[in-house]
Image: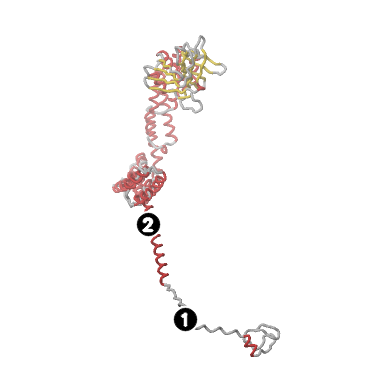
Amino acid sequence: MDCPKYGKVNPENCVFCGCCQNAFSKEETAAAAPAAAPAPLEPQPAAAGVKAAPERVKKQRGGKKWVIGAVTAFGFLLVGATVAALSFYYRALPASQFKRTLEDGNTAGAVAVFQSYSNDPDFADQAGRTTGEYVDGLMQSYQSREISGESALAGLEAVGLIVDTKQYVEQIERVEASRASFEDGKAAMELKDYQKAIVCFSKVLKEDKASYKDAKIYTERCALGWSNQVYAKISQKINQEDYLGAYTAAAEIDPLYASEDVKALMAEVREKAAGEVYSTAKELFDKQQYSAVCTYVQKFDPSMLTEELSQLADNAASAFAQAKIAEAEAIAAEGDLEGAAQLLETANGEIPNDQLMEKLREYGRQQDAGKLSQTKDALSVYYDAEDETYRFAPKGLSTRYINLGKNRNMEPRITADSTGAVFVLLFGLQEEESLYMEEITVDCDGRQYRLYVDFYDRNSQLVFGGGVLEWYTAIHTPQSSSLYKRAVNLQPMLEDMLSAKEVRVHFSGDRDRDVLIPAPQIQELQTMWEVFQTLETDPSLIKELAG
């Protein structure tokens, strides 16, 4: 209510103004009080002749709840049907069907599914991954010994059409072999054959992780048992003052498995055993049985060879070589170089020695020089002072120009200096017009060799008096060359040409020509090839031809 004096707003029904303390009269207080709410209207009876308005009927909420429940239930049914349909569709997919079949252990059925849909790249990829997971699980079960090796191999074999299981099959086979070795090792251990047992357990340690711990324990026990056996043998030989026998007994055990006691005993007898070996070897040396000295000393471990014993063995080998060289020289003096060389080859096989090898090389050079001297008259030689090289061709042919023509379709040549030799084989054909060679086929009694002629490899020139000469140069090299097409290994072809009864060369191009190589030209080829092989081995022998 408002104060009539200053207009201050006060709470309703106040007696005094909160600002000026002015007292409100009863009339002012009553006037400020809120009006009472109107009384509710009572229904009045309708006037005569007037129809009363119908009362509103309050709706029941029970029907609405039923509708909501029905809609909800229908929704759940719809979702369930959709899930079922999708599940059925998913299970019907080839990849899903394949996976489910494989997980059920029906490998035959899985393979059948794979064969039906293998043309689908997506399916094949998914099937490959699924099978890979199956194989990994199979291998884990095998390694943990949940399944046998036979079952694992059968599973791998069943899916071998889908993925490559070769490495897994090999792994299982190795493990199965090692497991068999494990049983063999235990049996050998029972028989106190510790060396054999250790060999068996070593295979297990390499292949079978599941048996690794047991195999390691058994190996340690076998090593101890083996050491005890060897220690007893060594001690027995020492008591008999047979130090060489003691060392031989000690050498029976692998140092890797020898106990510290055995190693100490071995060191003790080594020096005394070496003394016995030296005495025996010296006795043989004094009897000039040099080969026997070398053979005897070679039987022992290098750790036994003292400086004195090694020197004695070297002296024996040198004396043996000198004696054999003296015998060979006597044979060579009679002109039988081949017999002398055979004697030294046999001696070097018995007791290898540098002196014997050097003399063998000398005899070989003499033999090669003699062969070259015999073939010298069958060659034409030209020395190129500018290049410091020699050129060789069959006798009567020019070494500076091409000799191919109507009557010669093949020509061998050699270029050599003091560092090496090169063998070249020319094939050519003279015609009234150019043939434009593209391929040359050498036929040796049905065995054919093809030489493909590139545009830049074909040579041609006009011949005096008419005609065109075309030729191709093939260069021999033992190793294939990607830098030069004409550099090929001609040896297989040449060996067949020299052994064949008939050699034909077929030239292909715009037109074809087939020619027969005469026997005298094959003989020239053989001579040139033998000369080349000799110079290739020892280029310094060129002076035997050029002198």
Residue pointed to by mark 1: 49
Residue 273 lies, in percent from the top left, at 38, 39
Which image quadrant: the N terminus?
bottom right
Badge 1 or badge 2: first in the primary sequence: 1
Q: Is residue 22 left or right of residue 337?
A: right
Q: Residue furthest bottom?
A: 26
The amino acid on which the numbered mark 2 sits, given as a three-letter code, is Ala
Is the residue 57 above or below the residue 407 in the image? below
Residue 344 lies, in percent from the top left, at 40, 23
Residue pointed to by mark 2: 84
Is the residue 19 above or below the residue 400 in the image? below
The secondary element bearing badge 2 is classed as: helix
- Residue 196 visible, this orientation: yes
Q: How many marks?
A: 2
Of the pair 154 and 347, the residue shown nearer to us: 154
- Choose top left, top right, bottom left or bottom right for residue 369: top left
| Residue at x-position 66% and y-position 82% | 9
Residue 494 lies, in percent from the top left, at 42, 20
Q: CA distance from mark 1 to mark 2?
A: 69 Å
Whether tag 1 and tag 2 are in contact, CB under 8 A, the answer is no
Is the residue 471 above or below the residue 121 in the image? above
| Residue at x-position 53% and y-position 84% | 39
